[in-house]
Image (cartoon, rainbow, N blue to C red):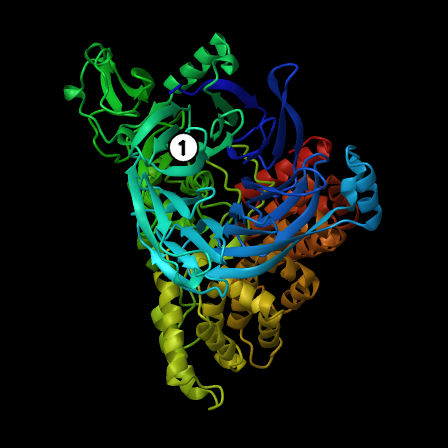
Amino acid sequence: MAHFQLSAQLVGHEKEVRAVLALSDQLLVTGSRDETLKVWSFSEERKEWQLENSFHLHNGFVSCLAALPSQCGPLVLSGGGDGIIRATDITRGSQVGKGEGHSNTVCDIQLGDEGNQFISSSWDCTSIVWKVEQTVDAAFSNHHQQNNNNNNKNDSECLVIHMTPLITLRGHESAVWSAVMLSGHCYLTASADKTIRVWNDRSECLQTICAHRDVVRYLYKIPETQKLVSISNDGCAICYKSSTSDGESDQRHWEIEHRLFLSNHFLYCLTYLPFIDCFAAGGEDGSVVIFSFQQGTVIETISHPKTVWAVATLPHRQDLVTGCMDNICRIFTRDESRVADEATLQAFQASVGNKKLSSSMVQGVDWDKLPLYEQVIDTPGTREGELKVVKKGNEAQVLIWSQQKWSKFGDVVDNPNNETNSGQSGYLDGEYYDYIFDVDIGDDQPKRRLGYRRGENPLAAAQRFLLKEQLPLEYIDQVADFIDRNTDYRQYNKNMEGDPLTGSSRYIPTENNEQKNVSSDPFSENRYRPTSDDYTSTGNIPSSGKQQRHFPTSEFIYFAYSDQYANMRRKLSEFNHQVSEDMRLSNEEWNWLEKLIAQLEKANSISSCIFSENELKTMEKLLDWPTENIIPVLDIFRLMILSPSASSHFFLQKEKFGLDKLQKHILSSSKASIGVVIMACRAICNMFSSRLVALLACDQWESIIALFSFTVCISHPKSIEAYCALLHNYGIQLSKAEFLSTTSQWIKFALEWLQLLRDHKIEDFSSIYAVWTALGTVFVTYPRFLQEAMEQYSLLDIMEKYVPTSPKIKECIQQLEKLIAAPSETQ
């Protein structure tokens, strides 16, 4: 069997290629973390691939692609970090349809056999089955019939793709990474909770398959069969067969037919190579593994410079397409006539051999026991893809056995005597770090590799790590605390100011929390106290050093932590006996409340919580309690709505139910304490954790801001903290194009608030900083508002008053001064 060799490299993306789609043997589409789709075509005349088009339609990274059949030309479905599924006419680069239903990243889209339905998967722990309808006006239809050989680009302006959610599959405890549709209304979903679930069209889970030991990353239906293949972070590929016919979907049972271990590292993507009856899987270590279930072995290994995120096939050309973390899409061929020139091949092999690997990536090595390079290079390997660490001079190198020879796979760059990674310095993804850790972020997540540079703000390192690994930003506290406890951060930065976005109280190791002054918090009596310093920010956190750029930022501030669950239970029990009988929780309802609180308390990330209908109804009843008893209810409510299932229920499915309840309690002026106002403000801040719910908050933004502007107590620091966070979140959201008509009014509110705080000599500069970063983001994005703020709202006077207040705010103002001096420059 001929081996795959490099044929072409498609260079154009600025960040890693996360998705590849072959529309034909001459037409490819790629999606990237740079938020663009790019279209590539093969020129038969030039015998080379060239970039045809590039367009930016998503407000986040692109993670998945699928081809949508259409009589009007090539259409592509794409999903990504903005949670929206978009249908794009790639000939024109225009969006012709949009599917909204997910509240977090869409990570997989797969079509059904008939082409008018597809299934999507998301980090919001759900999968949605969609119906697709294409509408074209009559004029276009007649024109198309008369000119079916013409490609009139204006025709596609008449085409509209309607995507309607039909079924939502809920039940997984963590992100749903992949899903497939089968005939007979049968659906399978693969999740980070390590399971595969089988569903019918009534959203009922018929079977839970626990075949993998780690996150299940991808499901693939073998064409023209009733068989499926899954791959996982456990390095295994598993083939399943169905025990029943298509017409008995509710009785269908899946069982394992083949299991094949492929890699010691995570597997991310999979495709079928029909021309050789094999599969290709790409993964974390930069390898594409070609394997056969029938032969029970790996056939070939294709090494890449970095992680391989996506694979696809050009079936008629019998070529393989890959998308890599090094921002390049590559095509590999078995046809000698299409192999790249020698210089390109050598450069590619050099980039592969220059990979930087930690010893933990090759399962640890003992320097004294390493074989010499000369002893290994002429000794045949035992299997395709075998890795061997050798001693070559003063270096440890990794060799791979592929195509019947040993080739360099990379260099081991950290201490080769270290068998486990415990924070040694070294290289990670080609970058040097003073510490490299294996981080365990929870029972339902695999370990990930984290690099930290000495002197860096732990929150900045944590944010970089979570964004790189595409992990929920709710983990930022946990990761930052891990860095603080396992490095010399505090010794190195004894005089370092606290996190600039949210204040020094934002990042304080757990053991110091009890030292905070809580006696002045008047929220409630009898020792129940909502946590005072508990909000989670995922802002644009600068590392240590001078002249930092503090904006623009696209991140919101959330109040996402509590250590008061025991006190919540006690206070709720007490109030449950005080309220009228018709408002009192029954024993059964109390049990549902206990389950709800227990889930919040135990969750590694509240965003992964799924609440039952009974739990949601119990919270609805609690929100009707009298205002004087509402504080512990609002404390639970503001945590719950960080979960997409709860925020969708309270703010979308039941329209404005959640907002109406919050406003009702705030307006109960005779009974609403400052604690009620603060808790309500925190809850609305948390609405921004869901994109669709954030849009609802923005629809009501003026009345909400006005409501808090006269209820916030300027003498209470937590009141100031919450309102500053709310202004920050609104500023970030309103800086987006669809809200430009109201942005000017928000700027007025923000500057008046800053003026008021300065007039009253309020020195909560960490909270005030959040307002400045939002203002800076608006002004950088739309410089015309900067001129308006100077002319109408005394911006320069307010800036001058804040220069001496805080080093971080001073840096913000200096950044604004540069923007004013050179308004045309991009900050």
Image: 720 above or below 137: below
- Picture quadrant where residue 286 is located: top left
Mark 1: give few (<14), some (14-19) or many (20+) Cα within 10 Å.
Answer: few
Coordinates of residue 127 in the picture (x, y in percent): 50, 55
Tally of marks: 1
Closer to the camera, 291 or 63? 291
Give the percent coordinates (x, y) of residue 662. Answer: 58, 72
Which image quadrant: the C terminus?
top right
Position of 211 with respect to 766 (left or right) is: left
Q: Residue at x 35, y 31 (%)?
A: 291
The amino acid type of the residue labelled 1 equals: Asp
Determine whether, in the image, residue 666 is placed left or right of residue 751: left
**Residue under circle 1?**
277
Residue 420 rendering spot, x and y as whole percentages: 23, 34
Q: Nearer the viewer, residue 294 or 16?
A: 294
Q: Residue at x 39, y 75 (%)?
A: 592
**Residue 764 in sight:** no
Residue 731 visible in rendering: yes
Please state if 68 lies on the left or on the right of 185 as rendered. right
Q: Residue furthest bottom?
A: 581
Secondary structure under badge 1? loop
Q: Residue furthest left?
A: 369
